[in-house]
Amino acid sequence: MAKAVCIISGGMDSALSAAIAKEEGYEIIALHFNYSQRTEKKELECFRKIARHLKALKTIELDLDFFKQIGASALIDKNIDVPTEGLKPGIPITYVPFRNGIFLSIAAAICEKEKAEAIFIGVVEEDSSGYPDCRESFIKRMEDAINEGTKPETRVSIKTPLVHLKKEDIVKEALKYKVPLEDTWSCYQNEDKACGVCDSCRLRLKGFRKAGEKDKIEYERYLN
């Protein structure tokens, strides 16, 4: 059976992406990164639940402490406030410099070792926070670079099944694939109750609302 390295943050996008890989017949190598993000413990807890749910062939948890040294993001630097006033044009302060490029590079190394054929990553371009490393064009160029820089027999496809979906579609698809959304986490700043006001909470709640579904996780605030 073909193997796929699935980058799983603990959020609903990456959980759905991995569930799609499973449905397509891949054996799952579940990959998670701890990079000193504010909600590191909660995301790791959710990752482990998702990996168990998907009956992953193998789970890999990597610590990337150097992200903290780089900083430059509200997700990592606690001296920078997480925005709570809603999405604005441009690249937000929650963007972590080249995070997905680094994640994909490491996933490619694991693919080569494990002889996996694909990397699944839950990037969303259509209805996201405006991160440049979620663009389909960027992912395609990363795929080309990976195949140029690995052994001749290594051929890796980067799969982005959610890249053109809106959040409400992601909610609907996740329910269709029986993804345990109550075991996923999207909040940028809290690990107990989701704040409800950061960009990621707003996008998640909007997606559930437009899908006509109820989110089972707890929030401190619910915005109309």
Image: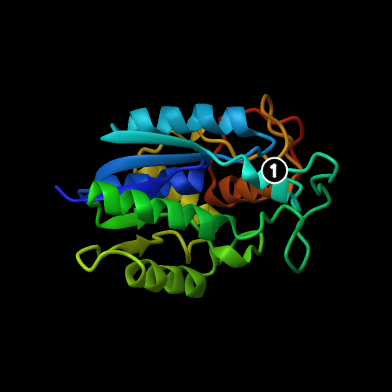
Residue 104 visible at all = yes
Q: Position of residue 94 (x, y in %)?
A: 72, 52
**Toward which corner of the image does residue 143 lie, by quadrant?**
bottom left
In the picture as drawn, the residue positioned furthest to the left comes out as 1
Q: Position of residue 66 (x, y in %)?
A: 63, 45
Judge left or right: residue 157 versus residue 35: left
Q: Is residue 127 above or below residue 185?
A: below
- Residue found at x 45% / y 57%: 105
**Toward which corner of the image does residue 97 lie, by quadrant?**
bottom right
Q: Secondary structure at mark 1?
A: helix
Q: Position of residue 198 (x, y in %)?
A: 74, 45
Foreground residue, 221 or 192? 192
Count residues near mark 1 (Cα–Cα under 10 Å), then give few for <14, some for 14-19, many for 20+: some
Judge left or right: residue 196 versus residue 55: right
Residue 122 visible at all = no
Q: Is residue 20 above or below residue 182?
A: below
